[in-house]
């Protein structure tokens, strides 16, 4: 697998080019598509097994709406209660402040090794390179994240960061970096190799770090949901613990947590619950804890009438698992920390020009919205972003002119009927070489549809119209 481009460069993302690279490797795309659709099927099975599933979605969405519309109050409540528990709370307005705070905490205590569990926020802040440039070794302890770290790639999925890789890819990466057998691609062997390589870091690390799935204002508690236990080791073995918390992760009360816990793993992996739901509330005896509340554009998004709903996201990845575009283009093609449908609406809030292509990486079939556990109207937001991209002139000349042509065609019934009838005849009669050419983007990865014998308008004129007249 080739290395991804730097997701933190200012270069405009070319999703089509990135997708083309992924599609060219048939074994990888076939596995990727099948694996993610399996997760979607498992999700459906679990969801259909709970009679109150839709009520849970409504309740979860309502809790998030309430919290986000009272966010300042709950943030202050969380700070008060966490501080009362003995935790030091920090505030970071952006990625720069977040990284500086983490470095200052570590440097003041002479820490040169940090073990951490999976955190999309630290990826968003580009924290690891920042710390490594200042002499601090950062070790990802989630298996998928560690694979991506060793292969110098960002995560391609929110929940399963290395889902685009085959076991043989991992075998090569581990052989080059941690010395496992290059010819042994057995998943159990590779996981054990990772375990043996990583466990010593937990012992010698001066600090551990986790992300945050939910932050409970009522108790000042950080809750993490994992399946490997690495967050527990990161948060409890080293003497110093740091939690990186996006301000949108707040929920008001502990009683609300059960709603989200019931939905998170079912939506993400099709399992009833995560293996470890861990609560970090106070420093252990002789240790210290630091919680960093991070904005990094979230307040700006909260003020966007059409897009603040995306702050409800609980990072389950269900929208990615169901999306036909994501499944067949791979996460790295999105060129940002967040991929798939959720990435198509989050990334443009950071940099519209850079990510202007992502809202067009969708069929607008609405499946992403249908599976979202907190009922984010994802496909509607994607459509709204398309309108904004066009209004701000961020579409290519070819797309702009083709849309103008399509608009004229669709606005004229007679012209549209003539075109559709002629297109059907052309598909049925023209040589294949004429139809499949560089100008036919549809035909590059798929067969053109079988043309119907008659259009709906022709059928209606021949059948229903006669019935009405009779």
Image (cartoon, rainbow, N blue to C red):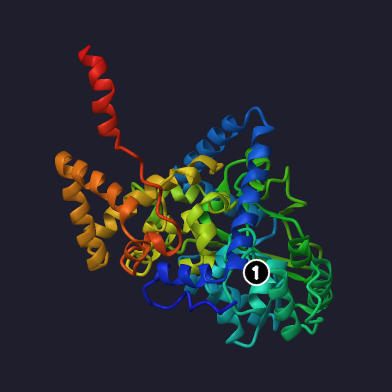
Q: Residue at x 69, y 80 (%)?
A: 109
- Residue at 23 percent of width and 27 percent of height: 461
Residue 228 against residue 25 in the figure, above or below: above
Indicate the quadrant containing the C terminus: top left, top right, bottom left or bottom right: top left
User: Is 363 located above or below residue 47 in the figure?
Assistant: below
Q: Percent position (x, y) of residue 34? A: 63, 55
User: Is residue 342 among what the camera can see?
Assistant: yes
Query: What residue is shown with label 1?
Result: 165
From the top left corner, tell me how far across and down residue 225 is, in percent. Answer: 70, 53
Query: How many numbered dots are placed on residues in this image?
Result: 1
Front-lying residue, 139 or 63: 139
- On the image, the x and y values in percent for residue 203 come to 83, 76
166 lies left or right of 75: right
> Tag 1's secondary structure?
loop
Camera-side residue: 421 or 335?
421
Name which residue lies at 32% across and 68% down: 353
The reply, left or right, for residue 47 in relation to residue 9 is right
Query: What quarter of the picture does the N terminus occupy?
Result: bottom right
Residue 47 placement: quadrant: top right
Relative to 174, 70 lies left or right: left
Residue 335 appears anywhere in the view = no
Residue 440 position, x and y percent, is 33, 63
Q: Nearer the viewer, residue 256 or 157?
A: 157
Task: Mark 1: give few (<14), some (14-19) or many (20+) Cα within 10 Å.
Answer: some
Of 307 and 98, the residue lying toward us: 307
What residue occupies the far top of the structure in this picture? 470
């Amino acid at each position: 697998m080739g290395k991804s481009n730097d997701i933190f460069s200012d270069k405009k993302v070319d999703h089509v080019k990135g997708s083309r690279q992924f599609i060219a490797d048939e074994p990888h795309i076939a596995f990727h598509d099948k694996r993610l659709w399996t997760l979607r099927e498992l999700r459906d099975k679990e969801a259909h097994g709970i009679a109150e599933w839709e009520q849970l979605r409504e309740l979860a969405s309502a809790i998030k709406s309430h919290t986000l519309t009272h966010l300042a109050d709950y943030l202050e409540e969380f700070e008060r209660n966490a501080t009362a528990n003995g935790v030091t709370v920090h505030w970071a307005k952006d990625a720069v402040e977040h990284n500086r705070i983490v470095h200052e905490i570590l440097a003041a205590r002479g820490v040169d090794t940090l073990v951490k569990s999976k955190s999309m926020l630290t990826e968003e802040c580009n924290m690891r390179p920042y710390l490594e440039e200042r002499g601090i070794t950062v070790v990802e302890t989630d298996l998928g994240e560690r694979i991506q770290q060793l292969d110098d790639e960002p995560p391609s999925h929110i929940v399963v960061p290395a889902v685009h890789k085959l076991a043989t890819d991992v075998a090569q990466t581990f052989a080059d970096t941690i010395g496992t057998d290059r010819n042994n691609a057995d998943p159990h062997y590779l996981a054990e190799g990772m375990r043996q390589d990583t466990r010593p870091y937990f012992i010698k690390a001066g600090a551990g770090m986790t992300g945050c799935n939910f932050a409970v204002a009522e108790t000042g508690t950080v809750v993490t949901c994992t399946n490997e236990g690495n967050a527990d080791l990161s948060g409890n073995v080293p003497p110093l613990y740091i939690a990186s918390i996006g301000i949108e992760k707040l929920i008001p009360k502990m009683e609300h947590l059960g709603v989200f816990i019931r939905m998170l793993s079912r939506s993400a992996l099709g399992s009833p619950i995560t293996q470890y739901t861990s609560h970090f509330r106070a420093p252990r005896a002789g240790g210290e804890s630091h919680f960093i509340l991070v904005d990094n554009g979230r307040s700006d998004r909260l003020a966007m009438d059409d897009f603040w709903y995306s702050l409800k996201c609980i990072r389950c990845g269900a929208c990615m698992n169901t999306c036909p575009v994501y499944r067949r283009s791979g996460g790295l093609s999105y060129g940002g920390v967040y991929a798939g449908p959720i990435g198509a609406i989050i990334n443009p809030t950071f940099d519209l020009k850079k990510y202007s292509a992502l809202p067009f990486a969708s069929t607008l079939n609405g499946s992403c919205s249908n599976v979202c556990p907190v009922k984010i109207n994802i496909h509607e937001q994607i459509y709204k972003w398309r309108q904004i991209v066009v209004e701000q002139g961020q579409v290519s000349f070819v797309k702009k002119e083709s849309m103008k042509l399509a608009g004229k065609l669709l606005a004229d019934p007679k012209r549209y009927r003539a075109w559709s009838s002629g297109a059907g005849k052309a598909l049925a009669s023209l040589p294949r070489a004429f139809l499949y050419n560089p100008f036919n983007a549809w035909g590059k990865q798929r067969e053109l549809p079988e043309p119907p014998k008659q259009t709906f308008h022709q059928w209606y004129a021949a059948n229903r119209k006669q019935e009405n007249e009779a």
